[in-house]
Structure formats: structure tokens, C-alpha cells
Image (cartoon, grey):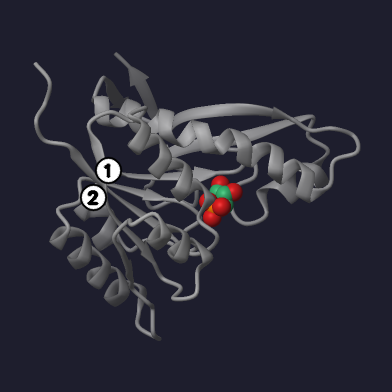
Amino acid sequence: MPREVKSRIAILISGRGSNMLALADAVREGSVPQMEIAIVISDQPNAAGLAHAQSQNLPTAVVERRGRSRDEHDRELVTVLQEHQVDFVCLAGYMRLLSSHFLSAYRNRILNIHPSLLPAFPGLDAQRQALEHGAKFTGCTVHFVDQTLDGGPIIAQRIVPVRDDDTEETLSARILDEEHTLYAEALAIVNGGAYEIVGRRVVLK
Ligand code: GRF
């Protein structure tokens, strides 16, 4: 029997928001079934992605750090998420680490996308790290967020070749194309619920 109630997603951004837009498209087109975007939140009032979200009539909010501690900032964020009855949180270019309060409020319900095949090249500038390392293949990863940096259980990955003439820009663009479909696929898996987290592994049922 189809479920009546849709899961509500918050997408957290800090910048241009192309993954946020790709997720919003996927939700609208039905490739992420039974979900709706509850809110797009940015910690940066001038994030380009905020204007893009507004132009698509998505609800938005800005929760700035304003010199507060990570814990204080995240407590406000969690309050906003709860007010919007959010079930899942998708980090999409959100440039902050999360506090333990946030992590435990949404345990195994926070996803992140990272532009490498984790556990290779965590942290900033993953595409540049792959080029500088001389990797022949890299890619993108959607994973659950835990207290480690880009280290939580992996939900889905996509491989992208590195070409000899790649620059950081060309490689990033090739990876980004894959990110835009991978995130929706991973979110559909999670919302479908047909998986188990066994140790570090996300095992599909
Ligand atoms: C993406 O490459 C994502 O993997 C990383 O930050 C970038 C965000 O891009 N976490 P956008 O804001 O979604 O366009």
C-alpha cells in the first residue's frame, strides 16, 4: 500500500547549491519517491544556492554562525529542523562540521556528498588531491555523517576517470555531473529503508 506521508528533507548548503538543485529536481520528477523538500538552509546569507532555491519556490532559511560556538549554532539549526518536521538532512556543499548534539538528534539520518572515492581524499579540495596524487580514477561518494571527517558509512559511490590533460576545473566538472545523479539515488535507497548498517557497511536488503 503506498505510504501517505512523505519524508521531509532539509538540504544544508554554503555555496552555489548545484547538488541541492539536482536533488530538488529529482524529488519533483519523482525519482526520489515519497519525499519532499521541507527547507533549504544556508549558513551563508549570500550563498548563490539560496537565490536558486528561492527562484524554485523552495522554503529557505539562513542560520548564521555569528561568532557563536559550533554547539550553539547547531542547537539553533536543530530547532529549525524540528520546527520543519525534518526526517532527513542532506549536506550539499555545507562547509561546517556538525556538533555531537546535531549528530545525535539525526543519527543515521544525515547524508553528505563528497567529490572523491572515500576513504581516499577526504577534506577540502578532494579533486585537487586526486590530481596531485596522480590517481587514474576518482569519483564521488554519498555517505552517512558521523563524528569523523568524511568518514561515515558509505551509501553509494560512482567512479570517474582522471584524464592526463585534466585540470582541477575539468575534473571537478566531470565529477559534479555524477554527483548530481548519485545523491538522488542514495537518498532513494535511504528513504526506501531496504538497508542495514552493519558496522561500517551499508548493506542493501
Ligand atoms: C560538491 O562538489 C560536493 O561534493 C562538495 O561540495 C561541492 C558542492 O557543490 N561537498 P554545490 O554547492 O552542490 O554546487
Q: Nearer the viewer, residue 197 or 5?
A: 5
Left or right relative to 163: residue 74: left
Answer yes or no: do the residues labelled 2 and 1 have beta carbons within 8 Å?
A: yes
Left or right of residue 41: residue 162: right
Residue that protrudes farthest toward the right in the picture: 165
Kind of element beneath mark 2: loop
Query: Residue flagged by tag 2: what amino acid is it?
Result: Tyr
Task: Write the residue at 9% across / 30% down.
Answer: 4
Tally of numbered tags: 2
On the image, which quarter does residue 121 sit in? top right
> Residue under circle 2?
106
Left or right, 48 with respect to 100, comes to: right
Residue positioned 75% across, 41% down in the render: 171
Residue depicted at x 70% and y 37%: 174
Q: Residues within 10 Å of mark 1 (few under 14, many from 20)?
A: some
On the image, the x and y values in percent for residue 48 come to 52, 65
Kindly state the secondary structure of the residue where label 1 is placed. Answer: loop
Q: Is residue 15 above or below residue 72?
A: above
Q: Amino acid at mark 1?
A: Arg
Q: Which mark is residue 109?
A: 1
Q: Residue at x 65, y 38 (%)?
A: 175
Q: Residues within 10 Å of mark 2 (few under 14, many from 20)?
A: some
Q: Percent from the top left, x then y, of residue 135?
A: 78, 34
Q: Position of residue 113 (x, y in %)?
A: 49, 43
Q: Which corner quadrant holds the C terminus?
A: top left
Whether 78 is drawn above or below 191: the answer is below
